Image (cartoon, coloured by chain):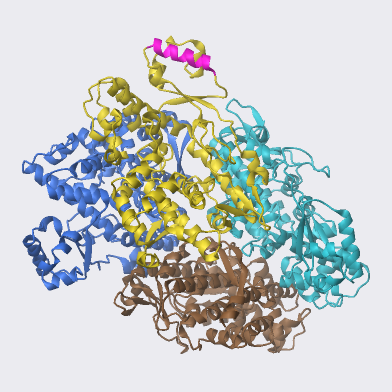
Chain colours: A cyan, B brown, C yellow, D blue
Amino acid sequence: MSTRNREGRLAEEKVFKDPVHKYIYVQDHLIWNLINTKEFQRLRRIRQLGTSYLTFHGAEHSRFSHSLGVYEITRKIISQFERSGYSDWPKEEKLVALCSALLHDIGHGPFSHSIEDVFDTQHEEWTCRILLENTEINAVLREFDPTYPERISAVICKTYRQPIVVSLVSSQMDADRMDYLLRDAYYTGVNYGTFDLERILRVLRPHQGRIVVKESGMHAVEDYLMSRYQMYWQVYFHPVTRSSEIILRQIFRRAKELYGGGYKFCSLMEPIKKLLAGTIDIEGYLELDEALAQTAFAQWQNELDPVLSDLCRRFLDRKLYKYVTMDAPDEKLWQQIRDCLQEIGLHPDYHLEIDFPYDMPYDVYRPGSTTVAGKEEKPPILLLSRDERLSEISSRSDIIQSITGIRQGKYHLYYPEEPLRESAHRLPANIRELFAFM
Amino acid sequence: MSTRNREGRLAEEKVFKDPVHKYIYVQDHLIWNLINTKEFQRLRRIRQLGTSYLTFHGAEHSRFSHSLGVYEITRKIISQFERSGYSDWPKEEKLVALCSALLHDIGHGPFSHSIEDVFDTQHEEWTCRILLENTEINAVLREFDPTYPERISAVICKTYRQPIVVSLVSSQMDADRMDYLLRDAYYTGVNYGTFDLERILRVLRPHQGRIVVKESGMHAVEDYLMSRYQMYWQVYFHPVTRSSEIILRQIFRRAKELYGGGYKFCSLMEPIKKLLAGTIDIEGYLELDEALAQTAFAQWQNELDPVLSDLCRRFLDRKLYKYVTMDAPDEKLWQQIRDCLQEIGLHPDYHLEIDFPYDMPYDVYRPGSTTVAGKEEKPPILLLSRDERLSEISSRSDIIQSITGIRQGKYHLYYPEEPLRESAHRLPANIRELFAFM
Amino acid sequence: MSTRNREGRLAEEKVFKDPVHKYIYVQDHLIWNLINTKEFQRLRRIRQLGTSYLTFHGAEHSRFSHSLGVYEITRKIISQFERSGYSDWPKEEKLVALCSALLHDIGHGPFSHSIEDVFDTQHEEWTCRILLENTEINAVLREFDPTYPERISAVICKTYRQPIVVSLVSSQMDADRMDYLLRDAYYTGVNYGTFDLERILRVLRPHQGRIVVKESGMHAVEDYLMSRYQMYWQVYFHPVTRSSEIILRQIFRRAKELYGGGYKFCSLMEPIKKLLAGTIDIEGYLELDEALAQTAFAQWQNELDPVLSDLCRRFLDRKLYKYVTMDAPDEKLWQQIRDCLQEIGLHPDYHLEIDFPYDMPYDVYRPGSTTVAGKEEKPPILLLSRDERLSEISSRSDIIQSITGIRQGKYHLYYPEEPLRESAHRLPANIRELFAFM
Amino acid sequence: MSTRNREGRLAEEKVFKDPVHKYIYVQDHLIWNLINTKEFQRLRRIRQLGTSYLTFHGAEHSRFSHSLGVYEITRKIISQFERSGYSDWPKEEKLVALCSALLHDIGHGPFSHSIEDVFDTQHEEWTCRILLENTEINAVLREFDPTYPERISAVICKTYRQPIVVSLVSSQMDADRMDYLLRDAYYTGVNYGTFDLERILRVLRPHQGRIVVKESGMHAVEDYLMSRYQMYWQVYFHPVTRSSEIILRQIFRRAKELYGGGYKFCSLMEPIKKLLAGTIDIEGYLELDEALAQTAFAQWQNELDPVLSDLCRRFLDRKLYKYVTMDAPDEKLWQQIRDCLQEIGLHPDYHLEIDFPYDMPYDVYRPGSTTVAGKEEKPPILLLSRDERLSEISSRSDIIQSITGIRQGKYHLYYPEEPLRESAHRLPANIRELFAFM
């Protein structure tokens, strides 16, 4: 193995210029070869933030950039562990950890959240299939070490025998989150998301199968969590972004519905067809990228189904749904609106969408609880005192205590403005007022 | 007219978050409406730097972002002129100038340089057609003022009656260049491209139909030109980017050749077909975007023509051509290589490309000469002394004198490595040595 | 008056390069003349952060820089108010507000907190005296408008007839705090203190005699308050800085005690003598600067009094007191330590100091309460809704609610390490353990 | 020795927050102990840029900060050499190099250039004396290794047996210059001075007793030299800074002249007296700092000699000399002005100073020539090609060729405005015109 590792080093390290980390350093043949596979290059064609570029025009960065960033942060953490000679860090896991960091998002498709919602798939599953089935990535890994595909897949499924490797890429303060906060802040131009990465890296310690934080780093972690809080409210939950995601989801929902109902599409490219038919295989999945999705939408603008063509036009030309905000749910009112829509010839399933941003499977910080769906949460952030005692951070920091599990969100009703406004005179007064139609 | 202007102001200014300028401010209905046209939204699907993202992974920003940036710089320049009450600035031209800044790139297609080369079109022409023909942009402009389409088109063609408006968006130090240097530097992460925009804006003066620079701003201009020099050599002329542009150009060239020869494509989407046939109209042109181009390449990976499918695969999977560098041209050697390629069954027209970065229609700085093609150069940068005398900047600054018209570039020979390496034993020694095949 | 204003504008605006705001713009003769007075230039010789440079070596910036910064932020706020034409902003107060911003710290002496503590003076009083008595500043103001000295003094005493002017320079989110957070963050290199100034400026509104915040700016204010929270804990309350402040205070306390007791100083420069004698007048006060204070300390290193000379040496050579931390007060223990110090020949009044950072007269955020001392707090931050209702921000934001009035600080015991360690064998076990003397 | 090195490592590395390098890492007891000597702490009381803070108010940073920065850059360079295992780097010299970097400026006094000019001393000499004579620094070094004082002193005198160590801290692209360019740019706020430090560090190579640059780093070096060019013209040679330096030099010149002539000073602090008398020893020299100098100036404002008191007032209140610019020397005119000054009762030696910024002992870049004074220049920057050939950079880069030895400066005549203006009617027309007295 040691010979292999030695062979594995590049004669001269490769360097990527990166706006967030300045440079990304590649020192191993294995990493270099993985980056050059076609499955990894495909990540260049999938935006990191899905439709957020429709709200923050700068947010056009890809999952390719982010994946390199996660790799780089992981490399730095491990390098610090090695320099300091911490005995709790299993040195032989370095390359497994680096590969996992690099590849953790390899299974993402275009606009993943929407596609996963409508077609009931999960990008983590696709990640494992790309690692284990017949792909260039699988070949590169196997050639290096036949056990690698399984091991990296185990890290991503959080079943790996060395939990500390899992926690590097999947915990409340993992390399994934650290990179995306910094990167999304950089590309949107929102400076709330910045925190002192160098300091956080310095206070991380491997400790009994976990990554913990030296007590003196508490304020740095507070700052990191506040960045996260701000990014969620300013960027990730932005109502305009949610509006575009709703349009997207409706496009896929409508297309699936039409396909299921035997509708004949004028244009239907092969991988999309498989997606609608529920028969998509790994080859087809890898052909899905944002270029393909947008081209499909462009073609569907000319479909005969008015709902589908309207939605596609809205997405491409950014004529999004408008919204009104409500503090509390009101099922009765919502039903009344749906009935009205029906009456005036609109489509209640497509022309009204009620959104509550907390449906999303993450929150700012929760220490170790389980989600409603019973899914296990990411492990909490632990502080390590000088005398080696551990404590969960929200028990030590008032500020973190206060944001833990905050749930005060609002309801947004999304709707297409023009058709509603045109029939405003046929709507009851309370609804006219709600939508501010005079 | 004054009533119109008053009407034309938005009740509350709109704001775009922008990483380069922090915020972009929209104060006029007209500008807001132009941004919301489908032709302007289309710019979101065209990258500012073409294929540079294959070299600098961060450079994934679109012409949409850049166009907003050029608008914002122009707005700031004019706002400074108005605040200072300079009499040489024609106040009534403000909106024409802002529209021209916003729309100056509206005619760009995907990977413009390659398409223009192969299909002999020009994005400036398309810009004018989009302004003048049946588009949403034309409708928005006409509704505001029936003379606007023609006037803005004249600014872009540099024939406008008020040359100072032309020089705002097209000169050696115009809003266009200032934005792209800063923006490309930001997104690539290369910090050579930064200069002190705020200072430059402060030293600009309208003067007898031109924008000139207060003498005391000379060092700021030097810094700006040095940024430009560095960006050209570090980013725009980067040999890996050139390699990907060559692949692109070859894809289009091959497809056109095949189409002309009657080849039957398995997949040929309508706008691409029109492009190959030379019958593309404005509607078809507006459907061309990078999503469509990349989807076409994805489909063509499966074409029977091995040259085309290989090129498309290379582009999508980033298996670019390698290159060797030569200080001087050597036509004889190049012909010898072409003959060898022919002999070993390769394609001299596609498997060897000689590139000399100075073919590109710009250089770092040239004061007022005309290009080889007889095309008029961008007007030079003039310094205005305290006693109102003008002097061309390179006559005053040694450092600018020294970079003016620098032409020391090198020749790069691009070629596909694997097929050549496989047949290396069939190549003469001098060529084997050139390509470092042992 | 209008002629005066016209006269009052500089023919060409003056510009200061500033690392925090990029540039500071001076447009009025009055402001320019104030900056050039000797009292204002004196602020160059007084550090903004007192002794913090002994902890953060970059924090060497002066009150001169900060005062320009407060002026610039105030200028930007007013300029926004004027551009937007808000009727609640009293336009005629512009210059009074700018002068107040520029001069609000003019009464600061070297290491103000320590001197104010020991000699029971207040820099606000000195500010008013400098405005009203025989100084260059008074002359410049009077020449412009005889009412100006009184008016600006009233703004600083918070008794001005236009409370909105007071709130610009003295409220929970005033120009003073905004500048010092950004500036201190910049010079220390701690990036916790950054927030989006441009956005905050955009959401401020004059409203019935107060500056309030547009509701949509709530998250920006959250971010600003979080910066403040972090800066207090990371920078302003840093225990090493507190240690150096303690040394400083002790130097002044000792010198005053010696002077009062008739001790003959080898060196005693005139302004210091007046300070110790309690007879300092405005002329003497203006001679006090950090150069003078440090020179006095340098001379006192050679005084015969061992306490004074030791303290001065400690300050200049940065041999600060060490500290231990305690969660709760323990008067009995503290008395025991004092007794022990006495016994081993040390000086309980000088060789032990107990510090609880909340003694300081500010906290992160408190909405409108009064302090223990009955002194009125700075007015709270109010949000203005679209329908013109006001609400105090902590009632709307969970995160601000949670940091309001946080008081969880710790106790620090400061002491000189070497003399204690040398006599460690004479200390009881519990004290030896506390100080970690084995 | 190896045991010593092992002992020499700190149990936990110490960290300084630094705005330029983010953090400065101290890993050795020796370095830590040197920083804590009183001679090193004294550098906190000496500004890095002398009087530049009178032009750029942010430039208040000290030689303490800069010295830490030079140390940190040196540490990074060596760490890269060690990681890469370059055989041309003498590993055993690491600590000597780090100490030399840290201490290279230890001999600087307040406003060094002026004092050196007037009193004919050199800070390099003082540096060596502080290393070799009876100081805390000498004690710390000797305790670690008795040969260290001599060795470090040899590095600073450029006579060390290992020239590569000398070139780390003293060459055309040494750690000293790299830190001061970045640091001065940061603190002035002038962003011309930034260059890509991380990239430059990566392309440095130890090679046969020198530090050279990998050929591929040429553009990074160009960028670094351009930064230097801009910083010299924008900051270091700024005419207002030169004016304040002239005042300073005149203060010292006048005081020396008065002292020599037997004038009785009202106030004359001991170390200043020794300086004027030419009897200053090392103890006295170490008491000289900016606090002392400024306090002396404050006292001298009240001296009876009108020239001295006026100069001191000018310096403290920033009433600097004005200047006019001339393209070419004109000795005849200058003599005429001096004669006129004499006639109207002014002092030709103090009230006129002609400055040509190139008198200063550095220029932007000169490859290996010797200065007029016969002093050896800093060694040039060498590029190392892939095949291990060396070439001097200006022979490879047009842009560097063009700035090499640029000497186009102008002459500035400095003079006190008011007294001249008052007697303007007594001046001949040509001089009135020169000074723009109407």
Magenta residues, dominant SS class = helix
Residue D329 relative to residue A408: left or right = left
Q: Residue at x 32, y 36 (%)?
A: D40
- Taking depth in this image into account, of B177 and C233 the one nearest to the observer is C233
Picture quadrant of residue A389 = top right
Residue C413 relative to residue A200: left or right = left
- Residue D429, given in percent of the width and then of the height, sits at 13, 73
- Residue D304, given in percent of the width and then of the height, sits at 12, 44
Picture quadrant of residue D385 = bottom left
- Taking depth in this image into account, of A151 and D225 the one nearest to the observer is D225
The correct choice, above or below, for C314 with respect to A314 in the image is above
Q: Residue at x 63, y 82 (%)?
A: B144
Q: Quadrant of the C terminus of chain D?
A: bottom left
Residue C194 relative to residue A296: left or right = left
- Taking depth in this image into account, of A36 and D20 the one nearest to the observer is D20
Picture quadrant of residue B83 = bottom left
- Residue A240, given in percent of the width and then of the height, sits at 71, 62
Residue B261 visible in rendering: yes
Q: What are the residue bounds of the magenta stretch?
A: C330-344
- Residue D154, given in percent of the width and then of the height, sits at 26, 41
